[in-house]
């Protein structure tokens, strides 16, 4: 196994995701890509389903930020692209057509690409036995490059251009966020599934290394705050990632060889209103709605806490939002 | 009194395999030593994958077989495996091909030499196992080469030639081998697999020009572009590859004869055309029925010929014009429709007519649309020939578009 990184000083100084991109200031997915490429190293193929991380990374003037081989795949093609690439490498190696060595195949897809249109393909990939095949979902909780439309990973109550807050539906998004990582953990025999965010940086990088060395296809869901989609100051991206953990709005965990553990447990949880309050996508919420989010967050945390103690996954079932707070329902 | 028994002299027959079209293609994939195969079931092409899966399970050859979650994934898998440098195989039919359309399109624009079989099948709804060409025609504009096999032997040969043409550096485009559903996929005839040594010379291992592999250094493939920057040039590259493919196809079939010993005309197969006054234009497995009908009509004094296209893309327009030079009536046996098209004709007919427009003397043409999957009869083909003959005498078709297999009034 590639060694874990013990301190920030040990982080490789070489970037394989470099200049030549035109991502937004404070782009969470771009920060994630950089950490990912450092952790994975040079013997890597990157594959990019359509997303911000496609359109903004190699745009317009034939520039490319990738110092390792990279190929686009269609929005719903992430799982298949990773599988096809890994299958080709294994076939060529086993038939003596290519030198035998360890090559990482990493698909960096968005929540639209993995939670929605490419969900079935991702599930297919997790059923095979290709080693060093890693899927990283950079979860900015919306289709961002098309102009912030809701995906099935958009949180309850967020406004997006497809789930706007309006005069009849003041809440915005009425669906509860899908937990993609748990569905990946449900694949029998899966070696490694984790969640992470941009803070603390070593946590994500080490999860990448563990995933690649796990001996099978692996999956990491990385919460990547998006200044344009979430409406916050670009300088606050990493702080917001930290705040997500501190408020239990995001839970960082890993599931290795059937063993569950929490990776980050805030000393004293902060009310979720502080996380919501820094983001424009929640600015329309009233006190009742915020209280409802706090209730759901607490209810869910109970399960994560229990899982950590058990070392096993228990499905977190959260009772539906109180209909009284969704103003769509007429009295 | 004992009966005199004559024992017939023993005749040794050359041993042949009797294979369906799907089995014949599976043999070709094995002989081509394909590295990555992506499968998903849909009739009538599925048998190819059943056979390949068993061959790999039995250790007859080595390949990664991925059972995909959908046809879209199937074609994405082989696209990406091809980008790494593997020789790949996929296939589908009907709505399966429609489902994979996005992935099929990008494979051509990525200039990756994937080879796939399209087992022609009617599109839904309702579900229909009948044979139609509209599923394959979905991809007529995208940059896939398409050859159209007549029988299991040709399906095997065309698959090997498809790899050779697709992987040629002057082409680098994906390649469909189209097989008429049931009439070719499920019909068994004697097939001679080619000698291994000959194939080895004919089809060397695939060497990609720019493999997506860290061992070959960093490349970025298909990054998003500004349309004003290289948009038209990128389309032109595919256009040029398609144009170049015509010469490559001619060379390939010549080499196939040299190394494997079987000879085919590259683009057009004429039958009875030496003295023909009218011609039926066909593709695929029903050509043999058309030839049978033409032979019967010749007994009645109608000098009918049959012209079979072996390639749909690139469309052999020059060769077709040469084959039909001086012909006084043309019938097009067409298993496609194109709802609302010019004169409400079929897609195949429309393309043939477009190619013939530049002839000095344009013959009258009749389109026989065999849509919906109901099998045509030889009698219907004979009637079609009689109708083309009639048009050739008057210089004009009494009715240009006909639906011979339709019950009820052909309005």
Image (cartoon, helix red, strand yellow):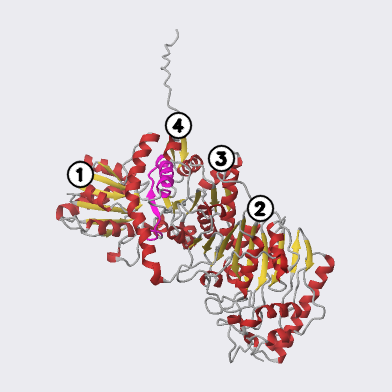
- Look at the picture and state if B254 lies above or below A310: above
Q: Which residue is mark 2?
A: A129
Is label 4 in contact with label 3 (beta carbons under 8 Å)?
Answer: no
**Percent from the top left, x then y, of residue A111?**
61, 71
Residue B390 or A101: which is nearer the viewer?
Answer: A101
Q: Is residue A207 magenta?
A: no
Say what secondary structure mark 2 lies in: loop
Q: Is A13 drawn above or below residue B287 in the view shown?
A: below
Q: Earlier in the sequence, mark 1 or mark 3?
A: 3
Residue at 74% x, 87% y: name it.
A291
Tag on residue B16? 4
- Alpha-carbon distance for marks 4 and 3? 22 Å
Q: Do dots 3 and 2 share one subunit?
A: no
The residue tagged 1 is B276
| Disc on the earlier residue, 4 or 3 | 4
Q: Which residues are magenta?
A: B139-167
Q: Residues within 10 Å of mark 3 (few under 14, many from 20)?
A: some
Which residue carries the number 3 mark? Answer: B61
Q: CA distance from mark 3 to mark 2?
A: 20 Å
Q: CA distance from mark 4 to mark 1?
A: 35 Å
Extreme residue in the top direction: B1
Q: Chain of mark 1?
A: B
Residue B140 magenta-highlighted: yes
SS of the residue at dot 4?
Answer: loop
How crowded is the residue under tag 1: few (<14 C-alpha within 10 Å), some, or many (20+)?
A: some
Which chain hosts label 3? B
For marks 1 and 3, give the CA distance.
Answer: 48 Å
């Amino acid at each position: 196994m590639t060694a874990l990184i013990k301190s920030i000083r040990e982080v490789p100084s070489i970037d394989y995701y470099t200049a030549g991109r035109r991502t937004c200031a404070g782009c969470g997915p771009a920060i994630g890509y950089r950490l990912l490429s450092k952790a994975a190293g040079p013997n890597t193929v990157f594959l990019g389903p359509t997303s911000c991380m496609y359109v903004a990374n190699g745009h317009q003037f034939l520039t490319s930020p990738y110092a390792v081989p990279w190929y686009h795949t269609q929005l719903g093609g992430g799982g298949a692209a990773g599988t096809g690439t890994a299958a080709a490498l294994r076939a060529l190696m086993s038939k003596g057509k290519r030198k035998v060595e360890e090559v990482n195949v990493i698909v960096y897809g968005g929540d639209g690409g993995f939670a929605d249109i490419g969900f079935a393909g991702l599930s297919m990939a997790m059923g095979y036995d290709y080693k060093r095949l890693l899927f990283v979902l950079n979860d900015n909780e919306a289709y961002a490059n098309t102009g912030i439309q809701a995906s099935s990973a958009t949180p309850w109550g967020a406004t997006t251009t497809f789930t706007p807050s309006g005069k009849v539906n003041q809440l915005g998004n009425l669906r509860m966020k899908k937990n993609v990582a748990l569905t990946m953990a449900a694949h029998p025999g899966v070696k490694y599934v984790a969640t992470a965010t941009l803070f603390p940086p070593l946590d994500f990088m080490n999860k990448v290394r563990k995933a690649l060395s796990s001996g099978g296809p692996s999956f990491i869901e990385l919460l990547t705050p998006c200044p344009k989609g979430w409406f916050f100051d670009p300088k606050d991206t990493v702080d917001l990632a930290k705040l997500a953990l501190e408020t239990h709005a995001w839970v960082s965990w890993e599931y290795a060889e059937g063993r569950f553990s929490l990776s980050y447990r805030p000393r004293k949880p902060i009310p979720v209103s502080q996380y919501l309050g820094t983001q424009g996508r929640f600015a329309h919420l009233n006190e009742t709605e915020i209280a409802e989010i706090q209730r759901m967050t607490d209810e869910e945390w109970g399960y994560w806490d229990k899982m950590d103690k058990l070392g096993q996954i228990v499905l977190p079932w959260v009772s539906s939002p109180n209909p009284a707070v969704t103003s769509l329902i007429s009295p | 009194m004992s009966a005199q028994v004559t024992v017939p002299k023993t005749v040794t027959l050359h041993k042949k395999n009797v294979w369906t079209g799907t089995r014949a293609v599976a043999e070709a994939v094995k002989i081509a030593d394909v590295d990555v195969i992506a499968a998903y079931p849909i009739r009538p092409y599925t048998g190819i994958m059943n056979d390949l899966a068993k061959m790999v399970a039995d250790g007859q050859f080595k390949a990664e077989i991925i059972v995909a979650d959908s046809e879209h994934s199937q074609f994405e898998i082989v696209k990406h495996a091809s980008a790494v440098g593997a020789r790949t195989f996929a296939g589908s039919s009907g709505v399966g091909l429609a489902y994979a359309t996005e992935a099929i399109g990008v494979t051509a624009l990525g200039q990756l030499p994937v080879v796939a079989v399209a087992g022609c099948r009617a599109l839904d709804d309702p579900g229909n196992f009948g044979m139609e060409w509209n599923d394959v025609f979905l991809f007529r504009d995208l940059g896939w080469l398409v050859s159209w096999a007549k029988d299991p032997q040709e399906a095997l040969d065309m698959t090997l030639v498809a790899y050779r043409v697709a992987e040629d550096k002057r082409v680098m485009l994906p390649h469909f081998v189209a097989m008429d559903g049931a009439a070719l996929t499920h019909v068994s005839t004697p097939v001679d697999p080619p000698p291994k040594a000959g194939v080895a010379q004919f089809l060397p291992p695939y060497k990609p020009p720019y493999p997506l592999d860290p061992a070959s250094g960093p490349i970025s493939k298909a990054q998003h572009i500004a349309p004003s920057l290289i948009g038209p040039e990128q389309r032109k590259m595919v256009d040029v590859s398609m144009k170049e493919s015509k010469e490559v196809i001619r060379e390939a079939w010549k080499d196939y004869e040299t190394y494997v010993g079987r000879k085919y005309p590259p683009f057009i197969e004429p039958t009875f055309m030496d003295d023909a006054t009218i011609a039926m234009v066909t593709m695929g497995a029903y050509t043999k029925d058309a030839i049978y009908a033409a032979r019967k009509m010749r007994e009645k004094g109608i000098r009918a010929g049959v012209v079979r296209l072996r390639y749909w893309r690139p469309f052999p327009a020059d060769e077709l014009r040469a084959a039909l030079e001086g012909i006084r009536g043309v019938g097009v046996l067409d298993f496609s429709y194109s709802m609302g098209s010019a004169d409400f004709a079929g897609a195949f007919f429309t393309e043939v007519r477009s190619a013939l427009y530049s002839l000095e003397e344009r013959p009258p043409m009749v389109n026989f649309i065999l849509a919906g999957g109901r099998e045509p009869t030889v009698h219907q083909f004979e009637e079609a020939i009689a109708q083309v003959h009639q048009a050739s005498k008057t210089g004009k078709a009494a009715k240009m578009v006909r639906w011979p297999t339709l019950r009820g009034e052909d309005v």
